[in-house]
């Protein structure tokens, strides 16, 4: 039987709650099909308070040997600044392993009622995950004075833009053959005009894919007014970040938003994590919705080549929500939702 | 009787249609109260095709003498690139006259059904309008090569950030005393951390205003999931741009989204314009919704000190929509909607 080596980083807050539920679903899904060897790492804000770092110096090297990484959530702002928790763990992993494609699916699961009157959308957001507006280049001068200036530089490379768009075109080809590229080239004339140019060049290679160019402002409006017109959406690090939280909202909330940080070249492990944060206020209370995390497990199985089991997990999630389980915050406990998914898997 | 000198730039496409309707409403509102001397300028893409510029070299100086500027919409991308039309007219006016506060109200007018199940929100977005992510600083190297890099630099000055936040705090004080400052300081550690610091400093001066700090991604989700929790929202040029299109969407569409580009120091004229673009596909067909433009007239009257007439115009808009006029695209012509508002004003 095939064995996958999985690195597990439950992290902080509800990251721990949902990871534990997701791992039970993974075990049930694997049974009789493949084995999963899980190694857990306690890297988190609690770890930081004890060791002064979010992960050991050889953390990245340790993770490199695994087939995949599963992360719950990171951050406990009351005691550790985000600049430490995120920039010391989550973001370095995305960058070190060149997980340049952040894939986030947005659709209403059976039984879930979103905030929109519109129904029946099915969007795959592909967010650039390694450069752009979150490059971390910038500085401040005349600090503290009346004359202070802060600059933050977005850096877009041809390699970076081309590979994410190519990834998007391939996904569109495998779906409804429609790609929307999101920029703001009427106001950002260097970075976004460049992105538009690369999109047009690549579009010529994919004549079977229809391409729409949209500005981020109009796109945000479209996600709310006509989400059913969208198929694959490709956006920069910042624009993808915004659109996928919006996508999470229209699919019923962050409790349903899954995400995969993919290294498509497979030169290093990919990482799977729900979009939601650590939500310290509800941590450890058995109330967090584990569906986003379980859906991320389905994404991981698909990436590992276990497409059939991935589909079975997604079907089990939807069998549970179709019965009304977990469809609204507070309706069911974490344990109940997990149990319903496991039961559907084993049915 | 007091006379206001108004510079009118109908611009392109439906800009012409809605401006004409809005000016008729303005005349009806002014009757017996004050006079409006209107000077129209044909600056537009058609003007550009004839003269090679969007406005004459002394355009800005010409506008400087007016009490206010009213603009319809600019752009006709099929013949003139946005880089010419917007950067040759709209954006230079905002910048030359230091119209640093872009005010955009978002609420559902009586009778209008938005795309959300949620109702009863009333948000005032204040967008920084002169610097930040749309500073236009940047460049490209190794153009066309595999090694090409494009950079775009956001520039935030203490003066720029402080004045827009102060403006927001004053607005909040005059409303429900809640201000949400929107950044992304967990990923953009120079510009957005700076903005957060300035917000905290100013908050100490306004102890009567409750301040929330939100990241743009979570904020986009909140606009859709719980818009009724928001009062005054202050954001950078880009984040404000995105949130106000989202605001337009949740209030029923761009046909309802008004905007004021304010120079609060009154050292130069302010400009009023609907948020929507020129929509070439429906231009001249008597179908564009003039409500956004008429609402912008109400904002202009308020800025000019005619608060009572401003309120009367807004009430007239809402009297029309309450009867079902103009509440959905295609339901009424531009002329019908204008006539209903004028009738309500004169009733
Ligand atoms: C926590 C934060 C840095 C992160 C991001 O912006 O990438 C999160 O919002 C996400 O979307 O994964
Ligand atoms: C046309 C464009 C440059 C403009 C902007 O982004 O400022 C518009 O979207 C707006 O919101 O007024």
Image: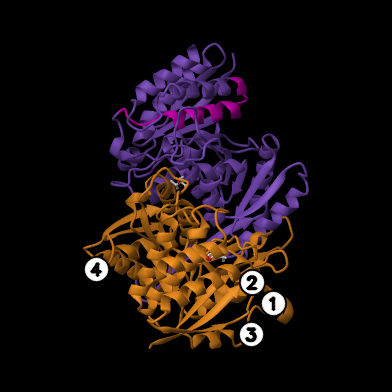
Chain colours: A purple, B orange
Residue A239 located left or right of residue B347:
right
**Are there few (<14), some (14-19), or many (20+) residues within 10 Å of tag 4?**
few
Residue B185: x and y in percent read: 41, 55
Q: Residue B205's mark?
A: 4
Q: Mark 2 or mark 4: which is in front? A: 2
User: Toward the viewer: A194 or A57?
Assistant: A194
Does the magenta stretch mainly form a helix, a strand or a loop? helix
Q: Is residue B1 magenta?
A: no
Tell me: is circle 4 under 8 Å from ligand 2.
Answer: no
Q: Mark 3, chain letter?
A: B
Disc 1: host chain = B
Q: In the rendered structure, which segment of residues is drawn in magenta? A: A286-308
Q: Secondary structure at mark 2?
A: helix
Picture disc at residue B56: 3
To the question of a shared chain for discs 3 and 1, the answer is yes
Element type at marker 3?
Answer: loop
Q: CA distance from mark 4 to mark 1?
A: 48 Å
């Amino acid at each position: 039987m095939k064995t996958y080596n999985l690195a597990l980083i439950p992290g902080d807050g509800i990251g721990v709650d949902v990871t534990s539920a997701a791992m039970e679903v993974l075990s049930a899904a694997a049974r009789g099909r493949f084995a999963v060897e899980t190694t857990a790492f306690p890297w988190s804000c609690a770890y930081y308070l004890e060791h002064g770092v979010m992960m050991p110096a050889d953390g990245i090297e340790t993770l490199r040997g695994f087939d995949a990484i599963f992360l719950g959530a990171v951050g406990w702002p009351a005691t550790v600044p985000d600049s430490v928790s995120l920039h010391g763990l989550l973001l370095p992993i995305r960058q070190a392993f060149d997980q340049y494609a952040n894939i986030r699916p947005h659709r209403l699961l059976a039984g879930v009622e979103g905030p929109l009157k519109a129904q029946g959308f099915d969007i795959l957001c592909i967010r650039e995950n390694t450069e752009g507006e979150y490059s971390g280049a910038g500085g401040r001068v005349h600090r503290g004075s009346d004359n202070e200036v802060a600059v933050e530089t977005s850096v877009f490379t041809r390699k970076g833009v081309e590979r994410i768009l190519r990834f998007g075109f391939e996904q569109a080809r495998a779906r409804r053959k429609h790609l929307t590229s999101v920029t703001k080239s009427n106001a950002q004339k260097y970075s976004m005009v460049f992105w538009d140019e690369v999109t047009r060049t690549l579009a010529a290679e994919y004549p079977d894919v229809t391409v729409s160019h949209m500005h981020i402002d109009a796109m945000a409006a479209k996600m709310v007014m006509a989400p059913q017109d969208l198929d694959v959406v490709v956006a920069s690090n910042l624009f993808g970040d915004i659109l996928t939280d919006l996508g999470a909202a229209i699919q019923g909330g962050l409790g349903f938003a899954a995400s995969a940080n993919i290294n498509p070249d497979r030169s290093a492990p990919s990482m799977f994590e729900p979009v939601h944060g650590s939500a310290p206020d509800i941590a450890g209370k058995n109330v967090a919705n584990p569906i986003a995390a379980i859906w991320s497990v389905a994404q991981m199985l698909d990436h590992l080549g276990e497409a059939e089991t991935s589909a079975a997990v997604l079907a089990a999630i939807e069998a549970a929500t179709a019965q009304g389980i977990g469809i609204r915050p507070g309706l069911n406990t974490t344990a109940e939702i997990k149990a319903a998914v496991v039961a559907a898997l084993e049915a």
